[in-house]
Image (tube, rainbow, N blue to C red):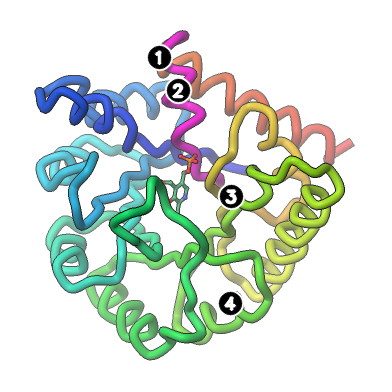
């Protein structure tokens, strides 16, 4: 069964637009879980543009399922992760000027640092996922570095307009998911997934989890978080039923 982890960063983005105390991402996390989310994801960025240190502490308190902290591999945030103990950290490349995470992590060229990070997190009981491009080489380096999981970057697939290029990118994701699963890695996928493009990603049969934020929080402005999360879970279930036939 493919499970859904809901990224609640953009609840904090709305709060930060006014610099006030609402809406609270911790409340969103509780509602998302009640609607069936099996994990809560937040990204503590170095510039604290949305989620802040207080949010992370509260999210750790209220999350009953699994807390996934997206983070850059920098000392300050590593220390915060170890102090807060999310269930999982997803390591992402982070640039200050970007609107959202751009591109996957280059595990190959940062291999020693990533290996050391995995062992530090494991010593503290925290699992590690690397957010990578759907590439066999990055998967291999992720395993060798000690990752428990990889999250395959679906942003390119989501943004391509040309149908042929989109199909080719989807095929790359499905191949990568299958090979990561064969190598006993847990496999997640995320970035840019929405109510129209998620089902196609579900059909490889090798993806364990999806990490979705913007589309769900956007829909929840109109229909509420409960309905927005349930709608996405229903789509995922329908896709799974299709491949079970
Ligand atoms: N996965 C990772 C690693 C991300 O950085 C993000 C964006 O925060 C997401 C998933 C969710 O992307 P989106 O908000 O486009 O659903």
Q: Decide which of tag 3 and tag 2 comes sooner along the chain.
A: 3
Instruction: Quickly name the residue at label 3.
Output: 155
- Residue 215 painted magenta: yes
Q: Decide which of tag 4 and tag 2 comes sooner along the chain.
A: 4
Residue 16 to residue 94: above or below: above
Magenta stretch in the rendered image = 210-223
Between the C-alphas of marks 1 and 3, the distance is 23 Å
* Mark 3 sits near ligand 1, with its Cβ under 8 Å away: yes
Between the C-alphas of marks 3 and 4, the distance is 16 Å
Instruction: Quickly name the residue at label 1.
Output: 221
Q: Which structural element holds mark 3?
A: helix
Between the C-alphas of marks 3 and 2, the distance is 17 Å
**Residue at image location 54% in from the left, 66% down from the top:** 132
- Residue 39 painted magenta: no
Q: Work out which quarter of the rendered image holds the N terminus and state it.
A: top right
| Snapshot quadrant of residue 62 | top left
Q: Which structural element holds mark 1?
A: helix
Instruction: Quickly name the residue at label 2.
Output: 218
Residue 245 rendering spot, x and y as whole percentages: 89, 36
- The reply to whether the C-beta atoms of the residues labelled 2 and 1 are less than 8 Å apart is yes
């Amino acid at each position: 069964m493919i499970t859904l982890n809901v990224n609640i960063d953009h609840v904090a983005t709305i709060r930060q637009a006014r610099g006030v105390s609402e809406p609270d991402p911790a409340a969103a996390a509780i509602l998302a879980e009640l609607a069936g989310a099996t994990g809560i994801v937040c990204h503590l960025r170095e510039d604290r543009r949305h989620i802040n240190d207080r949010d992370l502490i509260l999210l750790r308190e209220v999350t009953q399922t699994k807390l996934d902290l997206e983070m850059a591999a920098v000392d300050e945030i590593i220390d915060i992760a170890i102090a807060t103990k999310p269930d999982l950290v997803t390591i992402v490349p982070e640039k200050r000027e970007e609107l959202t995470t751009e591109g996957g992590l280059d595990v190959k060229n940062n291999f020693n640092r990533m290996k050391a990070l995995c062992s530090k997190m494991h010593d503290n009981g925290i699992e590690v996922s690397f957010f990578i491009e759907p590439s066999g080489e990055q998967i291999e380096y992720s395993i060798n570095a000690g990752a428990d999981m990889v999250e395959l970057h679906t942003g390119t697939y989501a943004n391509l307009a040309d149908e042929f290029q989109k199909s080719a990118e989807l095929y790359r994701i499905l191949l990568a998911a299958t090979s990561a699963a064969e190598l006993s890695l847990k496999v997640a996928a995320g970035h840019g997934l929405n109510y129209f493009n998620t089902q196609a990603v579900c059909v490889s049969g090798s993806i364990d989890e999806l990490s979705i934020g913007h589309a769900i929080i956007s829909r929840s402005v109109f229909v509420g978080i409960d309905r927005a999360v349930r709608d996405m879970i229903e789509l995922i279930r329908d896709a799974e039923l299709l491949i079970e036939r």
